[in-house]
Image: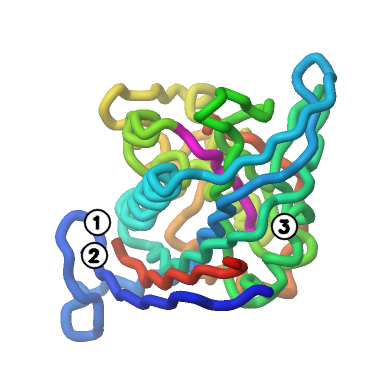
Amino acid sequence: MLGCLLSISILFCLSAFGEIAENIDAGNNPAGKSPTTVWRALLFVCHSIDADYTDKDGNPCHLTYTMSEKEVLDGVWSFEHFPSLANNYSNGEVTVEYEIVHYMEPIKTLASIGNNFWWVSPENIRQGLQDHAPSGAYDSVLVLWPQTDFSTGEHIPSTGWGLANSGLDDSSGMTYCTVANAATSIWKVPVVGEVWLHEWLHGICGFYQTIGYPMPKKDADGGEDHGYSNSSDKGWKEFYCDLMTGHISEEGSNTGITPEAWRSGTILSHRNQVSVNPLSSGTFENNKQTETNVGEK
């Protein structure tokens, strides 16, 4: 039976530039600076998997595995760097408030995305999402899941470390993305938290495009196509900064998430104006944190 075992709430605040911690309120908000848009996100940590899949040659396989405490901590640690990246790269236009749910029930099924590649779709964890991320509760759901058994090397084939819907999940009305477990060293390069930002941006770009703000081709995957490069120490920072401030040049016009787009509101304030788009795959603090363990026997 699902139950709540732990609930911890902590409020963190960062400056609009994501560098110096400070409380943002009417007393210290810079003159003329519009209030930041608050985006509600959930990190849904699926600790275990017990599911069938096929390998790249089409052979039937089954993975039963539970992530170690270190694997979970690594993924959560990386995720917790994502809100400050979002605030920094958007020039303070968005504040990500997040909660964390640790879901102990195993993933029982996977969704095929063709050519013997697999991912955890919203339908594969629908009951858990209905219980802990009901429609209207969040703008975005981000999922950490066990794709690899590091004790044996068994690995479920997929098209990327992270995958995302480029719009909204049709049942919950939230953006949805997944990131798989990884070795500790992988989470650290080139920028901690960038993988979560990247996958989150697929859904965010899809949402704002749906309500009328033009996005560059390939949205968060379009850096190289628009003349940007991946830096060994800063990752795709230059591209993400321009994408999240509406400065990606395309066919003589600027595209991306402009300040006006951020200030128009989040998914929760546009619930009657949005629709669903298909799966996209990527390459891989102002926040409120709440952690909950559920489904533990």
- The kind of secondary structure the magenta stretch mainly shows is strand
Horizontal side of residue 48 vs 191, given as left or right: right
Q: Amino acid at mark 2?
A: Leu
Q: Marks 3 and 2, Cα distance to the nearest angstrom?
A: 33 Å
Q: Is residue 251 visible?
A: no
Residue under label 3, please give it: 125
Mark 2 falls on what kind of element? loop
Whole-percent x, y for residue 68 in the image: 46, 44
43 vs 183, nearest the viewer: 183
Residue under label 2, please give it: 14
**What is the quadrant of the N terminus in the image?**
bottom right
Q: Amino acid at mark 1?
A: Gly
Q: Marks 1 and 3, Cα distance to the nearest angstrom?
A: 33 Å
For the residues labelled 1 and 2, say whether their Cβ atoms are less than 8 Å apart: yes
Circle 1 Cα neighbour tier, 10 Å, few/some/many (<14 / 14–19 / ≥20): many
101 vs 297, nearest the viewer: 297
20 vs 132, nearest the viewer: 132
The nearer-to-camera label among 3 and 2 is 3
Q: Amino acid at mark 3?
A: Ile
For the residues labelled 1 and 3, say whether their Cβ atoms are less than 8 Å apart: no
| Residue drawn where x is 42% and y is 69% of the image | 97
Whole-percent x, y for residue 66 in the image: 57, 45
Whole-percent x, y for residue 280 in the image: 68, 39
Q: Which quadrant would residue 242 be assigned to in this image?
A: top left
Whole-percent x, y for residue 70 in the image: 38, 44
Residue under label 1, please give it: 18
Counting residues from the start of the chain, the first of labels 1 and 3 encountered is 1
Horizontal side of residue 224 vs 269, given as left or right: left
